[in-house]
Amino acid sequence: MMQISSRFTIAVHIFTCIETFKDQYKMTSDFLASSINVNPVIVRKLLGQLKEAGLIEVRRGSGGASLARPADEITLLDIYRAVECVGHGELFHFHENPNQQCPVGRNIHSSLDSRLDKIQSAMENEMQNITIAEIIDDTKAKIAEGN
Amino acid sequence: MMQISSRFTIAVHIFTCIETFKDQYKMTSDFLASSINVNPVIVRKLLGQLKEAGLIEVRRGSGGASLARPADEITLLDIYRAVECVGHGELFHFHENPNQQCPVGRNIHSSLDSRLDKIQSAMENEMQNITIAEIIDDTKAKIAEGN
DNA sequence: ATAGTTGTAACAAACAGAGTTACAACAAAA
DNA sequence: TTTTGTTGTAACTCTGTTTGTTACAACTAT
């Protein structure tokens, strides 16, 4: 039943809000939380991670968040890594202690690791090819159409 | 910290054992469990899922498991799906209730879904291109080299 | 019958995700 | 300088999943 944490889609939602509403409203954690429909503290934790990754700027005290660089220079991979949806950058959890006395047990790791890396890379390459600008533009277009 | 369950790598380990040792030993859940170094019940549950997916055959009573079709016709995607590492076939967990009153909240899903599908497909395509025959051959080669 | 095995239920422990309250630190405006 | 609104963060609960464990009925071949 394992899935990549909703922190990832929430983070994308945050970016989309910031760019869509930046000229109208101050992008506080309360505003974002109400659009996403989660607790403001969840948003503040994510803002902290996105800020630490250098993707956004957050103004303490006065409040509000904004992008640290143009939306077409921020990819889904940047966000994915920033919010640490996967531990140690390893997508697959390898069983820890295969029996080293068994010929298969002591070789399975080196036989499998390179393939798991390839799978993970395929996924991350695809993420790197998608910028949040695309998603923001898409959303703005839908809003302009009256949706 | 989220990672794909070790059930997946354990399942690959199972296949590798079965094909490597099939002429020497009976592949019981106890044998497999000792190579993997987990409880035999874990193995039996996985064997049940792999059997239900039509990938292996398990002999009740007399004991032992074997492949249901040639190793080069079983892909990592087959195994991945069989052991249900991801819920509902959805890799990403979308936040459930974005605010429908917010223009971004009510459009984010349709803007993001197609991209998430592309990412998941990239990963699954890569999995489909890797057969367990590759991993088994690799492991056998390492054993033959004295590892 | 017996012995060895699978299938499965029932449970416990450890951990992670998600949500909540509370409050100190901070910055701008009154 | 006080007030107000906000961020940053600690501490906690709740819930669900993974993983591990014991126990035993169902089954098959010897």
Image (cartoon, coloured by chain):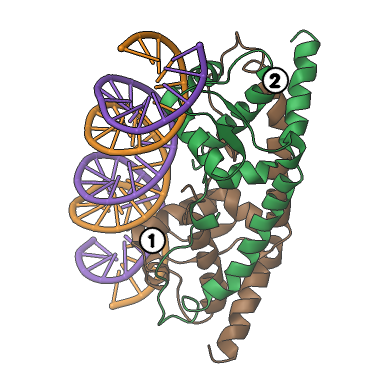
Chain colours: A brown, B green, C orange, D purple
Q: Which of the pair B27/A17 is nearer the observer?
A: B27
* Residue B45 rendering spot, x and y as whole percentages: 45, 34
The residue beneath circle 2 is B20
- Chain under label 1? A
For residue A42, which quarter of the picture? bottom left
Question: Residue placed farthest to the bottom in the image?
Answer: A146
* Figure check: B71 above or below A40: above
For residue A34, which quarter of the picture? bottom left
Left or right position of B48 against A72: left
- Chain under label 2? B
* Figure check: B137 above or below A122: above
- Specify the label residue A98 is tagged with: none
The residue beneath circle 1 is A61
Which residue is rendered at x = 54% and y = 80% of the image? A23
Q: Amino acid at mark 1?
A: Gly
Q: Amino acid at mark 2?
A: Thr
Quadrant of the snapshot with the C terminus of chain B:
top right
Determine if residue A53 is in view.
no
For residue D9, which quarter of the picture? top left
Q: Which of the pair B32/C1 is nearer the observer?
A: C1
- Mark 1, Cα crowd under 10 Å, few <14 / some 14-19 / many 20+, is few
Label 2 element class: helix
Label 1 element class: loop
Which residue is rendered at x = 41% and y = 59% of the image? A43
* Residue B2 rendering spot, x and y as whole percentages: 49, 43
* Residue B130 rendering spot, x and y as whole percentages: 75, 41
Determine if residue B94 is in view.
yes
* Residue A50 rendering spot, x and y as whole percentages: 53, 54
Left or right position of B79 against B48: right
